[in-house]
Image: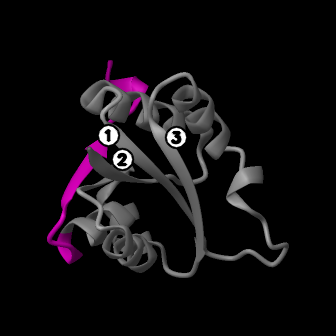
Amino acid sequence: MNDVLMAIGKDEDRAEVHAERVLELFQDDFRAHVLHVFEDNPEGASITNFAPARPVSNLLDGTEVEVELHERSGEPSAEIIQLAGEIDADVISMAGRKRSPTGKVLFGSVSQDVILSTTRSVLVCGSREEE
């Protein structure tokens, strides 16, 4: 059984597509570790109350997939890589998004940073727009 770390961001639709893609690829033969990294969380929000986690949980609830929810605070790519090591993830899965070259330079790219900073396999899932 594969341990898949599914790092989700703030967009509900992208989180849902992300879960669909991972489910298509691994069927029911994986354990999902769903992670959101709160960069700024003064209210102490929890992933269980985080809107993008709902479509992921709803989609995986009707399957044999074991789901564990994780939340962290801090710099997203570092927290993703650290949790991947702690759970010994077989794959880090992330939802990609289109960004202009200027946007990437100005704001960075969590996906790019994770890909370049880990020795683990990284799956970057597309969006519905590409269909």
Crowding near the residue tagged with mark 3, few <14, some 14–19, many ≥20 C-alpha atoms within 10 Å: many
Foreground disc of the pair 3, 2: 3
| Foreground pick, 90 / 43 | 90
Disc 3 secondary structure class: helix
Name which residue type carries label 2. Answer: Gly
From the viewer's perspective, is 84 left or right of 116?
right
SS type, badge 1: strand
Q: Judge from the rendering whether residue 57 lies leftward or rightward of residue 116; answer left or right.
A: right
The residue positioned 48% from the left and 24% from the top of the image is 63
Judging by the rendered image, the residue that carries numbered circle 3 is 15
Say if mark 3 contacts mark 2, CB within 8 Å: no
Asked if disc 3 and disc 1 are in contact, CB closer than 8 Å, the reply is no
- Check the image and tell me how it is coloured: one colour
Q: Name the residue type under label 3.
A: Ala
82 sits to left or right of 46:
left
Q: CA distance from mark 3 to mark 2?
A: 10 Å
Indicate which disc residue 75 carries.
none
Query: Would residue 97 be visible to someone looking at this image?
Result: no
Q: Identify the residue shown where x is 26% and y is 47%.
A: 2
Which image quadrant for residue 56? top right
- Horizontal and vertical percent position of residue 115: 22, 65
* Residue 85 percent across, percent down from the top left: 31, 75
Magenta-drawn segment: 116-131
Circle 2 — which element? loop
- Say how many tags the image has: 3
- Residue linked to disc 2: 96
Q: Which residue is mark 1?
A: 125
Do the residues bearing badges 1 and 2 touch, measured as CB atoms within 8 Å? yes
